Amino acid sequence: MTTRSMRLYLASAVLCCVVYFFVPADTWAQTGLAVGIGYLAVAAIAVGVRRRRPVGQGAWWWFAAGLFCNATGQVVEVIYTRVLHDDSWPSPAVYVYFALYPCLIAGAVHLSWIRTSWRNWTAMVDATTIATGFGLLTWVFIIGPAVGAPHVDLGTQLWGVLFPAGDILLIAMMVRLLLGGGTRNASFRLLTASLLVFLAGDVAWAVINQIAWDPPTAVQRILSTNYFVAYLLMGAAALHPSVREIGERATTPERGLSRRLLVVLTAASLIAPGLLAMELLRGRVVDGLAIVISSIALFLLVITRMAQLLREIDTQAQQLRLLARVDELTGLPNRRSWASELPQAIERARRDRTPLVVAMLDLDYFKKFNDEFGHPAGDRLLKGAAAAWTAELRAVDQLARYGGEEFIVLLPGAAGAEAVEILARLRAATPAGQSFSAGAAVWNGAETSDELVARADQALYEAKAAGRRQTVVAAVHEVV
C-alpha cells in the first residue's frame, strides 16, 4: 500500500460524500452511499493493518468494528422503517449504532495502554477532571431533561442517558490518549481528528434535540456528512505509512502541565460553580445535587493534582541535587562532591591519626585518542576506565571525575608505597590498551584540602613531564 493508494482512497471517499449531498433524500441510493462510505473506511483500516503491520493492531480492529457497526445501523434502520414499516422506539438499529462507542473507547484504551504506562496517574487525573466537568454539562442540559421528561417511557430515557454517557467516556479516553507520551505523527493526528469529528456530530445532534428543532434536509445532510468525514479520516489514519509507529512505546517523558492544559483544567473546574451561579440567577436551583457531587469530585481531583505536582517537584529537586554531585557521563562523584568530601576525610584522618593519600590521574594522550577514534569512543573510554578502576579500588577508597580526562582518588589509611601499588593495579586495568599518569600526595597532618590537592597536581605534572605512564609521589612537607 503506497501513499498514492491512500490518496485514491481519499478521493473516492470525498466523491461519495459529495454525491451523497445531492442524491434524493430517503432513497435507497442515499442509504447505499452512506453505508458504502462506512464500509469503505472499514476496508481501508483492514488493508492498512494488513499491509502496514502497525504496533497495536488490536486497537485498529476495534476502530474498524465500531465503524462497521455504525454503518450497519443504517441498514438495520432502513429495513425496519421501509421494509417492515416498524417505527417503534428504540428500534434494533439503536443497539447497532450504540456499539460504535464501546468499540472506539476500547480502541483508544488499547492504544493508550501500549503507547504509555497506563499507571500514569497524572494523565488519568487530568482526563477525569475534564470528563467530570463536561459530564456535569451533559447531565444538566441533556441527560437530566431526558430522564425527567414527562410521558417518556423507560427505554427512551435509558437511551437518552447511554449515548451522552458514551460521549463522556470517549472524551475521557481521548484526553488520556492526547496527554500521554508517544509519537504524534500524521496517523495519530488523523485518528484524533476523526474522534473529534465524531464528538462534534454528537454534540450538534444533542443541541438540536434539546431545543426540539426539526432541521431542514440540507442541515441533516451536512450533519450526516460530518460522520462520513470521521469515517474518511480514520481510514486515512490506518493507510498512512506513519501508522507503523503510532503504537510504539513512548521513549520521551509524557507531557506535563502546559499552559493550554492548565486553561482546559481551569475551565472544567469552573463549570460546576458557573452552572450553580446560572441557576441562582434564574431563581431556582434545579440540579443542586448533581452540582454538589460534581463540585466535590472536582475539588478532590484538584487536590490530587496538586499533590502530584508537589511530588513531581520534590522528585525533580532530588534529581537536581543528585546531578549536582554526580558526573553524568561516568556516574562518579563530580568535582563539587569531591570538594565537600575531602575536608571530611581529612578530619577523620586527623581524629583517627591514620595516613591519607590523594592521587590525581590523567589519561595519557587522550586528545590523540579522541582525534583518532572519535569523541564517542573517547566517552566510552572514560566510562570504561571509571568502571574498571572502581572495581580495583578498596571499599574505603573514593574515585571522582575531576574534569575532562582527569580523575582524583582518595585513599584513606594508605601510605605512599601502598598508594603506588593501588595505582599500579588501576593502570593495569585501564581499558582499550590505554594508560595514565598519576601524582600522589600523602597528607602531612596539617595542610588544608586545597594544599593537599595542589601537591598531588604538581606530582602529576612531574609524572607527565617524566614520560607519562607512571606515578610520582610528592615530597611530604614537614610540619613546622
Image (tube, helix red, strand yellow):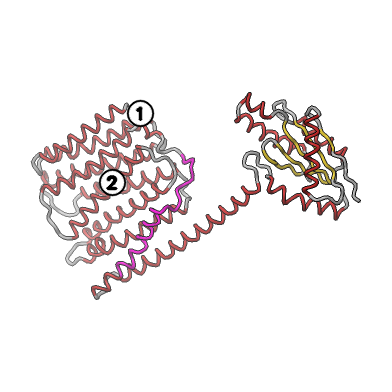
Q: Which residue is mark 1?
A: 51
Q: Which mark is residue 375?
A: none
Coordinates of residue 172 in the picture (x, y in percent) = 36, 53
Of badges 2 and 1, the one in the foreground is 1
Q: Main secondary structure of the magenta part?
A: helix
Q: Decide: is 265 above or below 385.
A: below
Q: Is residue 436 magenta?
A: no
Q: Which residue is drawn at the image coordinates 15% and 59% (left, top)?
A: 212
Q: Residue at x 38, y 36 (%)?
A: 57
Farthest-out residue, left:
24
Query: Could you say which disc has been placed on residue 100 in the image?
Result: 2
Residue 421, given in percent of the width and then of the height, sits at: 84, 35
Does 315 sit left or right of 89 as displayed? right
Question: How many angstroms separate mark 2 from mark 1 (CA)?
Answer: 25 Å
Of helix, strand and loop, which one carries label 2?
A: helix
Relative to 297, 202 lies left or right: left
Q: Please identify the quadrant where the N terminus is shown.
A: top left
Three-letter code for the amino acid on which mark 1 is drawn = Arg
Q: Residues within 10 Å of mark 2 (few under 14, many from 20)?
A: many
Q: Which residues are magenta?
A: 249-276
**Identity, as a three-letter code, of the amino acid under mark 2:** Leu
User: Going by the picture, which residue comes out furthest to the top?
Assistant: 372
Nearer-the-camera pick, 94 or 234 = 234
Q: Sequence-wise, which precedes: disc 2 or disc 1?
A: 1
Closest to the observer: 48 or 327? 327
Q: Residue at x 22, y 41 (%)?
A: 228
Q: Position of residue 256 (x, y in %)?
A: 45, 51
